[in-house]
Amino acid sequence: MGTMDYSGDDFYCDVALKGLVELRKEYESEAVLAFHHTRPFWPIHIVVIPKKHIASLTSLTETEKPILDEMIEVIKKLARKIEVEQGAARVLTNLGQYQDSKHLHIHVSSGEPLHR
């Protein structure tokens, strides 16, 4: 899968959701997309995002709760599958300065870091 240099602050709206990079999808609906990270940090590294721009977990509004509910269901299924297959899974989101892309995204992963 090809990746591209990107220096903006919302990879998901600017690149992934526009189809500018090939994605290996695990799940897709009208509201939610889950795909294998284009530059994985772990051997298994899936990202779950809302298709609507939501800046972060802490900026969610009450009207966006159904999107979060769907994301959680997708995360549960992916994490359970990875846990069964690999023996362990992690679920992670970042906020503020830890958040490279300013679009809500939740990582579902397993394994030791590929690089430090």
Image: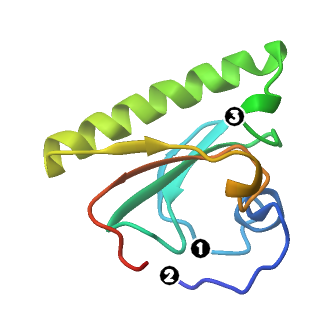
What residue is at 54 percent from the left and 72 percent from the top? 38
Q: Position of residue 25 (x, y in %)?
A: 49, 56
Query: Which numbered disc, 1 or 3, marks the residue that appears first in the sequence?
Result: 1
Tell me the kind of residue under disc 2. Answer: Met
Give the image location of residue 49, x and y in percent: 64, 44
What residue lies at 36% left-to-right and 40% top-to-bottom? 78
In the picture of the structure, the residue carrying the numbered disc 2 is 1
Q: Marks 1 and 2: in contact by CB < 8 Å?
A: yes
Relative placement, left or right, of 44 versus 95 is left
User: Is residue 49 shown left or right of residue 34?
Assistant: right
Quadrant assignment for the C terminus: bottom left
10 Å crowding of disc 1: few (<14), some (14-19), many (20+): few
Q: Quadrant of residue 2?
A: bottom right
Q: Measure the alpha-carbon separation of dots 1 and 3.
A: 19 Å
Name the residue carrying label 1.
22
Image: 55 above or below 77:
below
| Residue 9 x, y percent position in the rendering | 83, 64
- Secondary structure, mark 1, is loop
Q: Answer yes or no: do the residues labelled 1 and 3 have beta carbons within 8 Å?
A: no
Q: Amino acid at mark 3?
A: Ala
Tag 2, which secondary structure? loop
Residue 93: x and y, percent? 58, 44
Q: CA distance from mark 2 to mark 3?
A: 24 Å
Of helix, strand and loop, which one carries label 3? loop
